[in-house]
Image (cartoon, coloured by chain):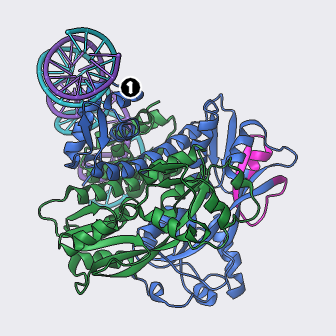
Chain colours: A blue, B green, C cyan, D purple
Amino acid sequence: MPLAHRVPDLGALELLLAVARLGSLGRAARELGITQPAASGRLRAMERQLGVALVERSPRGSRLTDAGVLVTDWARRIVEAAEAFDAGAQALRGRRDARLRVAASMTIAEYLLPGWLVALRTQRPDTAVSLLAGNSAAVAGRLLAGEADLGFVEGLDVPPGLDGTVIGHDRLVVVTAPGHPWARRGAPLPPAELAATPLILRERGSGTRQVLDAALAACDGPAPPLLELASTTAAKAAAVSGAGPSVLSELAIDEELAARRLVEIPVAGLPLRRALRAVWPTGHRPTGPARDLLGLTAR
Amino acid sequence: MPLAHRVPDLGALELLLAVARLGSLGRAARELGITQPAASGRLRAMERQLGVALVERSPRGSRLTDAGVLVTDWARRIVEAAEAFDAGAQALRGRRDARLRVAASMTIAEYLLPGWLVALRTQRPDTAVSLLAGNSAAVAGRLLAGEADLGFVEGLDVPPGLDGTVIGHDRLVVVTAPGHPWARRGAPLPPAELAATPLILRERGSGTRQVLDAALAACDGPAPPLLELASTTAAKAAAVSGAGPSVLSELAIDEELAARRLVEIPVAGLPLRRALRAVWPTGHRPTGPARDLLGLTAR
DNA sequence: CTGACTCATCAGTCCAGCTTATGCCCTCAT
DNA sequence: ATGAGGGCATAAGCTGGACTGATGAGTCAG
């Protein structure tokens, strides 16, 4: 049952990627700061665990087998997620010598920022980043109090006292489990039907909820929620389990859509896009690392 | 330097998710098959490693802190990638008692199948799946030889002797590193300019390459490649490093686009969509687990 | 033939994480 | 009030997995 016993640990996965990239156990071992026998043993243990040969060893080096190519790509997904975790965690530590302090809304902090921080680290490895996550008002407060250098918010407008630039868009998507009747409709859903149906929603006050309320106000607002949950993930889980339709950021559900655990329900002509903005106190254009981070997100 | 020392191992991440879900260290420990002190120690070690308190302990249970919510969501990404890895690896083992044998093209096997297999396992936990990855011809061969029950191919047509159904679409996307001149263009790229520019491509014979060759044939085919690489990942890495423009499946690059390691270059009116199809030998409609798997992918 | 690579094997050390046993705190029912 | 029960922390002891370091075998170039 526990996943950890069936999946190699992160060190082994990194080793596999290094072998794939460098073509040699020894070189991979050196790069990871372990000895060659350790790498040999570890790789062998991983192959035994998976029951598949991953690399062909030869006196001139090692190459991936066919299965190895596949496994390596799956492993890369895990390692990339781990890099994002690491980037986020480092930022969260909020070290005293922090030079770049970022404040971001929940959705951006969860799904976008870790990737940006990974990219920033390749440009400026020494920059220590600290991260605070909250709603738009909290982000604005931090910026105005001088406690953050750069903010990210999603929403319809720029909070007063701040300047900003649009760095992208986020679309709210109506989703259901694949078995739901809406998943079999031929035609797009009329907004009025969406507005009349009880949905699985985030709690009032979240950015997602605000946008939906505004968009459905013309059709007598959303109906009383079927469930009102405190986190995006909880709402996602409820929708996947078939509890009912939900409206979520497309950033949060790409994997569920790809795996068909959720399906998107088209809705006729409803403005469910919202801008993602980088923001800063009026007049204080970002400089230094904040400017670099901004450069990674907008162009 | 090694990532594994800065990111908690999978067991710890699973524990964190269980605590978040169940609201108690003891219950989480029981679910994972360890004792409560082990869970307590492990969680404490993780908090020490990250330098952040993740859960608030009280005599009535444990709740996530603000930082804990964020960390839990990043952890979930890792665990989901690990689940996909596990599903793929189990299929790869090709156990003797396998009941569902799947043959799939590389792109589908890498990026989509693991997710589907995770979903299938919730429906049919006992089904053992085996997986073979190859090009379209290899998939067709396996099916016609009775060595596979269900196939997945990407491409322009259905191989002879097979029936199939379209389960989705894949778009080929022109991408560059953010610093490339094309990334600053205002207008979409004319197809002729794309056709005249040396690109980073997969080797001839890959499905990706076939579609691109066909689409650019009208403009005198693609120019001789800048680099010709054996795997999608290698091409991706070359593009990210700024070696030049590349054309890749959108399935392979969503994370690079989100993190702005790559940017998409719009191209004016070029048919770079290709169908993803489930296929089976003519007359042998899928039944049993194959039918279930098909149900998860198409609707 | 020698040196420079590759990888595998063996023996020995060490530590991370587990279990068991215990204690404290809080709440709730008797 | 008092005990039962659930929550968590700490301490002591064990064990297995993973590392190092030394060594040997195979391949290739000079």
Q: Is residue D1 left or right of residue A232?
A: left
Would you say residue A145 sits in the magenta stretch?
yes
Kind of residue at badge 1 = Arg
What chain letter is assigned to the residue under label 1?
A
What is the secondary structure assignment of the residue under circle 1?
helix
Residue annotated with mark 1: A30
Residue at the image point whose x is 43% and y is 83% from the top: A180
Would you say residue A116 sits in the magenta stretch?
no
Q: Is residue B273 above or below residue B249?
A: below
From the viewer's side, name the closer residue of B225 and A156.
B225
- Residue B16: x and y in percent read 40, 48
Residue at the image point whose x is 49% and y is 36% from the top: B50
Q: Is residue B230 above or below residue A196?
A: above
Q: Is residue A47 left or right of residue B181?
A: left
- Residue B63: x and y in percent read 46, 51
Query: Is residue A138 in sight in this rendering?
Result: no
* Residue interval drawn in magenta: A140-163
